[in-house]
Image (cartoon, rainbow, N blue to C red):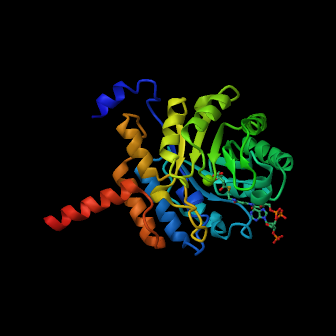
Amino acid sequence: MNAIVAQGSHHLPKEVKIVEVGPRDGLQAEKTQVPTQTKIELIDRLSKAGFRNVEATSFVSPKWVPQMADAASVMSSIHRVDATIYSVLTPNMRGLEGAIEGLAQEAVIFGAASEAFSQRNINCSIEESVERFLPVARAAKAAGLRLRGSISCCFGCPYQGETPIAAVLDMIHRFADLGCDEIDLADTIGVATAGHVSSVVEAASKHFPIDRLSGHFHDTYGQALSNILAALQSGVSIFHSSVAGLGGCPYAKGATGNVATEDVIYLLHGLGVKTGVDLAQVIDAGDFISRAIGRDNGSKVGRATLARLENSACSI
Ligand code: HMG
Ligand code: MG
């Protein structure tokens, strides 16, 4: 079946890098503190499953994001796989110091294409955020870390509505000037649709190399997989996703997390696109973390596969 689909998909990238963001973006909104050991086990399972990039935690203010307060403990206890890059969020110099001490290979600075979101998320304007990122970027490079810039609200903002493409391009220029190796186009609230994604990616690729642009889609409106396909067809080959679709706020009705990694891998492998990741192991990791935090598994592929396995075990 793959071969048939692949024939019509010759324009798609042959390989995709999936950045597994579940341990950070997925868990950060959990209201109940997830035990550090559970986070470590999750990251270890993901490393074993073959991800070459895991976003492990954030060195941010624990007053703002209490769930990530154990960042240093997480980074000191995970079992690292040599080929895997462990990324951490670093909003300021204090965060970068944590990243260096924690032996992260990639520092992530995160800004927004929307003024209102910048204020709510990192408590400063876009202009101020870039001033704050400058020493972080320099120090990250000096320490030999990779640098990634994440742009929130590239499509829509919960406070300002639809984001003008010009605002996204402005942030791309700012992050490129800071020396970012990779830039994320994030649909923070999951409102984008496929045509909008193609337009933003095509515009963005005129200003930054497409092979270093990534798609970070949340699935709030159920559009994430079609948005990924649109981005893929426009040449994007790096995508972020969260095992078991972790994320979202349990108290905000309708809010969901990142697109589920299992579903993305199923789509990509079905298209004959390589990821280097073992789907069965990701499904196990998704089952593990969903049970550990008492949440329904947010991956359709995960749920269907686990149900099939359970049924076949019953019939033996
Ligand atoms: P602030 O309150 O303006 O800064 O926060 P501050 O310098 O006044 O610091 C406040 C307190 O935090 C102080 O403690 C600092 O020491 C401490 P106090 O003196 O009051 O006891 N502090 C820190 N502690 C540990 N590590 C640090 C650190 N920095 C300060 N690095 C700040 C500004 C940026 C720090 C704050 O707003 C913050 O931490 N924000 C993080 C918000 C966050 O993590 N959001 C989620 C990640 S972004 C995201 O999810 C989007 C993404 O997925 C893409 C997408 O989907 O859009 C990436
Ligand atoms: Mg996100």
**Residue 84 seen:** no
**Residue 107 seen:** yes
In this rendering, the answer to whether 105 lies above or below 313 is above
Q: Is residue 155 left or right of residue 17?
A: right
Q: Where is residue 95, by image quadrant? A: bottom right
Instruction: State the quadrant of the C terminus.
Output: bottom left
**Residue 101 percent coordinates (x, y):** 68, 57
**Residue 296 percent coordinates (x, y):** 43, 67
Q: Where is residue 290, by image quadrant? A: bottom left
Taking the spot 36% from the left edge, 34% from the top edge, the residue there is 272
Q: Is residue 279 left or right of residue 169?
A: left
Considering depth in this image, is 178 or 259 the residue closer to the camera? 259
Taking the spot 79% from the left edge, 42% from the top edge, the residue there is 138
Q: Is residue 154 left or right of residue 289?
A: right
**Residue 266 percent coordinates (x, y):** 38, 45
Q: Quadrant of ligand 1?
A: bottom right
Instruction: State the quadrant of the N terminus.
Output: top left
Taking the spot 40% from the left edge, 54% from the top edge, the residue there is 282
Taking the spot 84% from the left edge, 51% from the top edge, the residue there is 125
Considering depth in this image, is 81 or 67 the residue closer to the camera? 67
Considering depth in this image, is 226 or 129 the residue closer to the camera? 226
* Figure label count: 0
In this rendering, the answer to whether 261 lies above or below 269 is below
Residue furthest bottom in the image? 32
**Residue 75 percent coordinates (x, y):** 59, 60
